[in-house]
């Protein structure tokens, strides 16, 4: 890294991105000056793969069903312990690329625009009946390594938009196991079992659980179960992308 680049990074990543060449993370085209604080250009943002059809009420699996009460085959058998789960887009292509930058490339400034997508989902559902927003927590050791928990940034930005308190301390991660994405589906449930703990203050609350990505839903299931066992009267879950 050049001396100029490191000096600019010292001033802050946003400053560095404004001054240095900043390509769109999706199409690699150079961003106009005004958009240097963003990760992608306007046209890539506008063509992110939004889920247009129906979704499973329990796990947000995209499905060609029009009923808001539809549940997928897996959830008919074993639903998530939530009132509903919703997802904005498909976890693929440009949205996968963008979330990778948000999570691993320090594009933490994506929190507000991505929270805007989640806000749109809540407006479409006409459900704001929450008194707390909670993120899927990250273990302390991983937080030290990465510097931020992208789910918590997202939860805080969404909470600000809807005027509800963000309460990251209500849910903690006790054990850092293997990343869910590295495991076959069959092992994902046991990998997160016992990984989360609810802290005092959950009883009788209506909580919105936030994460960036949902794959099999086992992480959301583990978090929601812990919150329900601690007495939450309602838990709903919302994610940017569903695999
Ligand atoms: Zn682009
Ligand atoms: Zn389902």
Image: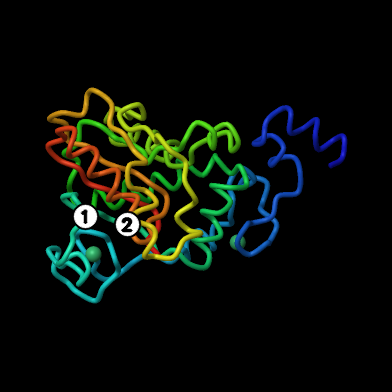
Q: Earlier in the sequence, mark 1 or mark 2?
A: 1
Residue 41, position in %: x, y?
A: 58, 57
- Residue at 37% x, 32% y is 172
- Residue at 12% x, 37% y is 233
Give residue 198's quadrant in the image.
top left
In contact (CB < 8 Å): disc 1 and disc 2: yes
Colour scheme of this structure image? rainbow
Q: Provide the secondary structure element on which disc 1 rests.
A: loop
Residue 14, position in %: x, y?
A: 64, 36
Indicate whether 162 appears above or below 81: above
Looking at this rendering, what residue extends furthest in the bottom direction?
Answer: 64
Indicate whether 81 appears above or below 59: above
Asked if the beta carbon under badge 2 is closer than 8 A to the nearest atom of ligand 2, the reply is: yes
What is the C-alpha distance between the residues marked 1 and 2? 8 Å
Asked if the beta carbon under badge 1 is closer than 8 A to the nearest atom of ligand 2, the reply is: yes
Q: Quadrant of the N terminus?
A: top right
- Residue at 60% x, 62% y is 26
Disc ID at residue 80:
1
Q: In terms of depth relative to the viewer, which is nearer, 86 or 179?
A: 179
Q: In terms of depth relative to the viewer, which is nearer, 188 or 71?
A: 188
Q: Provide the secondary structure element on which disc 2 rests.
A: loop
Disc ID at residue 49:
none
Q: Is residue 81 left or right of residue 1?
A: left
Residue 222, position in %: x, y?
A: 29, 47
Residue 234, position in %: x, y?
A: 15, 40
- Which class describes the residues within 10 Å of circle 2: few (<14), some (14-19), or many (20+)? many
Q: Is residue 165 left or right of residue 114?
A: left
- Residue at 45% x, 46% y is 113
Q: In terms of depth relative to the viewer, which is nearer, 167 or 163?
A: 167
Q: Which residue is mark 2?
A: 217
Q: Is residue 14 left or right of residue 94?
A: right
């Amino acid at each position: 890294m050049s001396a100029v680049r490191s000096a600019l990074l010292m001033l802050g990543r946003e400053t560095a991105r404004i001054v240095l060449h900043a390509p769109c993370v999706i199409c690699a085209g150079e961003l106009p000056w005004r958009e240097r604080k963003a990760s992608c250009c306007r046209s890539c943002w506008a063509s992110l793969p939004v889920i247009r059809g129906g979704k499973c009420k329990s796990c947000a699996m995209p499905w060609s069903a029009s009923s808001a009460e539809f549940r997928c085959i897996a959830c008919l058998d074993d639903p998530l312990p939530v009132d509903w789960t919703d997802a904005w887009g498909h976890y693929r292509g440009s949205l996968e690329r963008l979330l990778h930058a948000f999570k691993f490339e320090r594009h933490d400034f994506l929190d507000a625009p991505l929270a805007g997508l989640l806000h749109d989902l809540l407006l479409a559902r006409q459900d704001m009946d929450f008194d707390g927003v909670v993120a899927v927590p990250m273990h302390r050791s991983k937080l030290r390594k990465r510097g931020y928990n992208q789910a918590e940034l997202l939860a805080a930005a969404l909470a600000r938009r809807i005027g509800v308190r963000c309460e990251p301390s209500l849910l903690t991660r006790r054990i850092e196991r293997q990343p869910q994405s590295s495991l076959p589906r069959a092992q994902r449930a046991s990998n997160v079992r016992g990984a989360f703990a609810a802290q005092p203050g959950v009883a009788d609350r209506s909580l919105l659980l936030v994460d960036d990505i949902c794959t099999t839903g086992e992480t959301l299931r583990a978090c929601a179960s812990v919150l329900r066992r601690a007495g939450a009267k309602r838990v709903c879950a919302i994610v940017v992308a569903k695999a």
